[in-house]
Image (spheres, grey):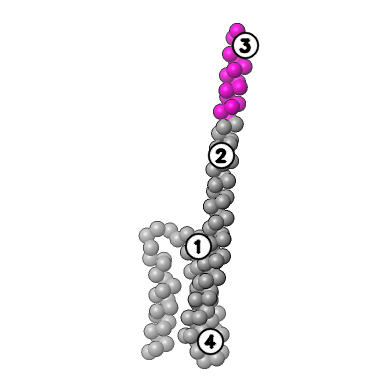
Amino acid sequence: MKRSLTIFLVIFFLAAPFGCARPLTTREKATAVGAVGGAAAGGIIGAAVRHPAAGALIGGALGAGAGLLIGDQMQNNEQKQQQQQRQIDKNAAEAERLKKEQERLKNADREY
């Protein structure tokens, strides 16, 4: 009974973020993957010492922490890339505007 309750609680807390209405961020996805992987590894290791629930809980917590750190770095990199892409797009639009302005001035000089 105790083992079933522990397994239910672990699954519930790992699955709870997936019930959200908005899509998960990179940080949240990495945390979930780390928690599930850590819980699985911890459960296996815990089973070897006859404490699979404790192993799963400890492994899940450690995995979630590691996943959070990795996901945070990944999300920061994505944000930097998006910012750089916005700047590239802005520069390309400005270059196009200047090119059109230059052509307009050339055509204006030819008319005189």
Query: Which residue lies under the disc numbered 1?
Result: 27
Amino acid marked by disc 2: Asp
Few, some or many residues within 10 Å of mark 3 (<14, 14–19, 20+): few
Identify the element where label 4 is drawn.
helix
Query: How far from the left and from the top, in percent, is residue 102?
Result: 61, 22
Query: Which residue lies under the disc numbered 2?
Result: 89
Amino acid marked by disc 1: Arg
Residue 52 makes an appearance in the image: yes
- The Cα–Cα distance between marks 2 and 4, rounded to whole angstroms, is 52 Å
Q: In this picture, is 76 found above or below 38?
A: above
Q: In this picture, is 74 found above or below 106?
A: below
- Residue in view at x 56 percent, y 28 percent: 97
Label pair 2/1, CB-CB below 8 angstroms? no
- Residue in view at x 51 percent, y 60 percent: 26
Q: Quadrant of the N terminus?
A: bottom left
- Residue in view at x 44 percent, y 72 percent: 14
Q: Earlier in the sequence, mark 2 or mark 1?
A: 1
Q: Earlier in the sequence, mark 1 or mark 3?
A: 1
Query: How far from the left and from the top, in percent, is residue 7?
Result: 42, 82
- The Cα–Cα distance between marks 4 and 1, rounded to whole angstroms, is 27 Å
Q: Is residue 16 left or right of residue 57?
A: left
- The Cα–Cα distance between marks 2 and 1, rounded to whole angstroms, is 26 Å
Q: In this picture, is 96 found above or below 24?
A: above
- The Cα–Cα distance between marks 2 and 3, rounded to whole angstroms, is 32 Å
Q: Which residues make up the magenta segment?
A: 96-112
Identify the element where label 3 is drawn.
helix
- The Cα–Cα distance between marks 1 and 3, rounded to whole angstroms, is 58 Å
Reply yes or no: does residue 83 show up in magenta: no
Query: Which residue lies under the disc numbered 3?
Result: 110
Q: Earlier in the sequence, mark 4 or mark 3?
A: 4
